[in-house]
Image (spheres, rainbow, N blue to C red):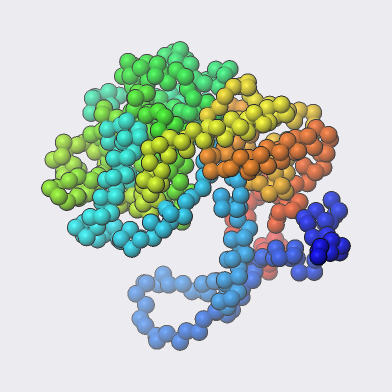
Amino acid sequence: MAMNSQGRPTTPGAVSPGTEVRTFTGHRGLDHEEALIFEAGSLSKSGVDLPEPKPVASRLNGLERQGQIGLPGLTEPEAMRHYVRLSQRNYAIDTGLYPLGSCTMKHNPRLNEKMARLPGFGDIHPLQPQQTVQGALQLMEMLAAYLLELTGMKAVALSPKAGAHGELCGMLAIKAAHEAAGSKRDVVLVPDSAHGTNPATAAFMGYSVRSIPARENGTVSVEAVREALGPDVAAIMLTNPNTCGLFEPEVVEIAKAVHEAGAYFYCDGANFNAIVGKVRPGELGVDAMHINLHKTFSTPHGGGGPGSGPVVLSEALAKYAPVPFIVRDGDSLRLVEDAADAEAQGQSPFGRLTAFHGQMGMFVRALTYMMSHGADGMRQASEDAVLAANYVRVGLRDLFSQPFGDQPCMHEVLFDDKFLKETGVTTLDFAKAMIDEGYHPMTVYFPLVVHGAMLVEPTESESKENLDLFIATLRHLAEAAKRGEVERFKQAPRLAPRRRLDETKAAREPKLRWRPDAAQKEAAE
């Protein structure tokens, strides 16, 4: 018997467009309103019963707290519900397609998580005797070997905790090499399209930054690099594939020119995800490169703690790698922890970057990804990432505008806001409207060399069906903007837990600390 098709509509959109349903509770169906934990809990009660502590003599020399600690008290169910509801507000790669350009929000395989939770990896401590963690050291040695094989480099530092930290590591190795040679150089070349951390790292180290403009096709010219080179240049920091989603066609010639000038080539490895198994950066002339394990080898962004940004170094810089590093003593492995021990190994480390040796959880996840994919699988992942980005490019090129022409891209495709000209809709408006459609927006207004930039990176994780729906959604929004549906964009997001904030006021008058209403009113008076 056929089901009754009559009755109330149950599909999303059953409410008339533009109609906002208000409820007494503030909830929207099963999407519960959630206050701050300080507003939900009471400062005067505790969710647990503890006996009154026995009086003890203070050892704080008058520095002990005089007032209440100010933590809200909730019951266990209240605390659990609060954090579960907050988690439901998060958009994540496990929720849907995450098209952030330059961030590579790829799927994090659950196999990685299972391996990272093995007791031999998950329960160890960095201060354990090294003979008790030989398996962990062997894993680090294997990960290092794989990274060197994939990049064609000579040495690797595993301890950096993120991409920017890795930049600092690579540039410190370059600085150490110049100092060892008695060369005093104080300039670093950085293309206009670089990640912001590149010039920031150089400036942090005391270098002056000299910009290299991009050509009309979005890439760097070897002639522009030659013109900027001189005896004062220590290095160039170049991203390849670059931040416009394009492979630098003159990268080998650029490396040669840099080396002839006595400088070094630092490559920002943020976009290594596009070329793993296809190109080895060391064979392009790169001297140092950081590798974001979250971008390229599927570890989570941050992973609930420190991230991981190993740095690979060429033969010219290998001896300056920081401690600690792993060496073999007969059948066992050990970490070289200090400069004297390193010098006995023939090394001249520039120093130490972190207290310990890196982030074991990220090492396990990355190596699991490498071993489960194999060489052919990692190469296919790169090919699929490039294919997916070009699929999006072709699917949108008749409606969207591309700043550097309709040329093939690498793992991400860059659009600008020219197609929105005279519509009254901005890049930000367009991004906010994507939230109502259930998508996290792509990266907007970056790279800075493109006005109204929209940088889309679908990654290799997405199926054709997911990409088709994403493309159709963006086409729908572009057509709506051109039809003049400006208010739809200016009011977006309308369906998110929170509406759009006044970003100018938020930047000028940020509220960085929660205070009870009474305290806020008193402060205002």
Q: From this viewpoint, is residue 247 visible?
A: yes
Q: Residue shown at 54%/39% (left/top)?
A: 459
Location of the N terminus (image quadrant): bottom right
Query: On the image, which quarter does residue 496 sit in?
Result: bottom right
- In the image, residue 190 sits, relative to residue 427, either above or below, namely above
For residue 445, say whether it is visible.
no
Counting from the top left corner in percent of width and height, residue 331 is at 15, 50
Q: Nearer the viewer, residue 54 or 314?
A: 314
User: Which residue is rendered at x = 71% and y = 65% of the image?
Assistant: 30
119 relative to 312, above or below: below
* Quarter in which the C terminus is drawn: bottom right
Q: Nearer the viewer, residue 411 or 492?
A: 411
In this figure, what is the number of numbered marks? Answer: 0
- Answer above or below: position of 60 versus 86: below
Q: Nearer the viewer, residue 62 or 272?
A: 272
- The picture places residue 375, in percent across and down from the top left corner, at 38, 37
